């Protein structure tokens, strides 16, 4: 059927037609004509605060979407108070809700046509939850108020974590959780990283890598574990997605014990179990300098060192307390390389 396109002279638009047209300018929620309710990112408007027991909400604007009704735009040019919060329960805590409500008689048969900020007290409970407005209501949460029992001090605090953000189509949506029905190419910011939906999963766009992270690369052996004593064992890594670059530095001390069997060192993350082994570099500085390799098997959480059997033999074998030379106080073992982690 034909529709009235916005905006042609002489055409008369119903409120529903205008709201449906406004859906074009608000991020979709995955349904036809559907939109995401919220305030504008970075806008301090519609912030709920307490002054004693009085609830205040600052001036601001919001888009309140409702299924089949398009987008209600609500603008509050000055602050508004929905009243005072209910007194604390004697022994049970409570969570209250403050929300922006739109009354539309054509939808809720309320006989009203207005928007306002509303307070709804929760139910005192050992495990309190915020209440849900009953009935057919067009609304958007703005804040919760946690009211401690009299026995717990009777104080109240506000959280605006429930207040959603919305952006124009194609904008970057700040949200604590991923959009439930994303479209290919959609971005959202979870507060730590920027993510993009590739059609089947979220790709993370990482910041420029900063300082590496320290970890303890546990040193073990296949027969008897060594003891570090007063030696030093340092591990550092950088992880970007599933790519891990790791460095291990081991210097035995005068009280170090060397155990027996083949040596292993713990990785910061288990390797991907994809059928591939990874080769890292190893360098041992003792009475001689030895160049070797570290091998990470598929799915392994440790790595083993391999060195030449002698200064004149190119065959390599596991590093042990005596191979490629006697590991001793002051020797230095350095390991570095990159591999793919399991997660």
Image (cartoon, rainbow, N blue to C red):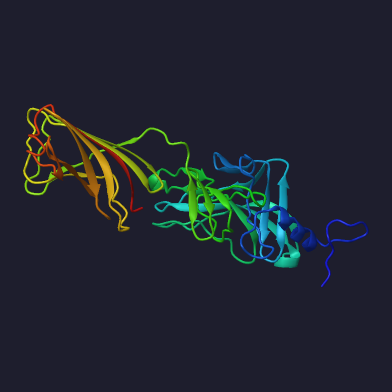
**Rendered image quadrant of residue 152:** top left
Q: Nearer the viewer, residue 250 or 106?
A: 250
Residue at x-position 79% and y-position 58%: 18
Q: In this view, does 67 lie to the left or right of 236?
A: right
Q: Which residue lies furthest to the bottom in this view?
A: 1
Q: Position of residue 296 (x, y in %)?
A: 25, 49
Q: In which quarter of the image is the N terminus?
A: bottom right
Number of on-image labels? 0
Residue at x-position 10% and y-position 42%: 320
**Rendered image quadrant of residue 140:** bottom right
Q: Let me know if residue 20 appears in the view.
A: yes
Q: Residue furthest right?
A: 10
Q: Which of 13 and 340 is in front in this view?
A: 340
Q: Which of 4 and 334 is in front in this view?
A: 334
Q: Position of residue 15 (x, y in %)?
A: 80, 60
Q: Position of residue 286 (x, y in %)?
A: 13, 29
Q: Which of 73 and 188 is in front in this view?
A: 188
Q: Is residue 230 left or right of residue 109?
A: left
């Amino acid at each position: 059927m034909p529709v009235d396109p916005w905006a042609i002279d002489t055409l008369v638009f119903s409120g529903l037609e205008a709201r449906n047209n406004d859906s074009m300018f608000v991020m979709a929620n995955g349904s036809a004509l559907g939109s995401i309710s919220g305030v504008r990112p970075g806008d301090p408007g519609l912030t709920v605060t307490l002054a004693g027991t009085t609830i205040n909400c600052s001036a601001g604007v919001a888009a309140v979407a409702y299924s089949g009704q398009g987008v209600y735009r609500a603008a509050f040019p000055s602050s508004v108070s929905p009243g005072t919060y209910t007194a604390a329960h004697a022994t049970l805590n409570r969570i209250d809700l403050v929300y922006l409500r739109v009354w539309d008689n054509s939808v809720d048969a309320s006989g009203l046509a207005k928007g306002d900020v509303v307070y709804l007290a929760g139910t005192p409970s050992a495990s309190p939850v915020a209440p849900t407005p009953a009935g057919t209501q067009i609304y958007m949460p703005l804040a919760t108020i946690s009211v401690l029992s009299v026995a717990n001090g009777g104080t109240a605090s506000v959280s605006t974590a429930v207040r959603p953000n919305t952006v124009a189509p194609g904008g970057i949506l700040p949200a604590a959780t991923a959009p439930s029905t994303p479209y290919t190419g959609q971005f959202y910011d979870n507060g730590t990283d920027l993510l993009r939906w590739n059609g089947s999963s979220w790709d993370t766009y990482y910041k420029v890598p900063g300082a590496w992270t320290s970890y303890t690369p546990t040193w073990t052996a296949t027969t008897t574990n060594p003891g570090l004593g007063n030696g030093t064992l340092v591990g550092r890594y950088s992880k970007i997605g599933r790519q891990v670059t790791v460095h291990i530095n081991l210097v035995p001390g005068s009280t170090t014990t060397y155990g027996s069997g083949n040596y292993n060192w713990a990785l910061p993350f288990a390797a991907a179990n994809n059928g591939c082994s990874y080769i890292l570099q190893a360098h041992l500085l003792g009475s001689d300098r030895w160049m070797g390799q570290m091998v990470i098997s598929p799915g392994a959480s440790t790595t083993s060192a391999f060195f030449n059997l002698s200064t004149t033999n190119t065959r390599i074998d596991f590093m042990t307390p005596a191979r490629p030379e006697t590991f001793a106080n002051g020797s230095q073992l350095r390991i570095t390389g990159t591999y793919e982690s399991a997660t």
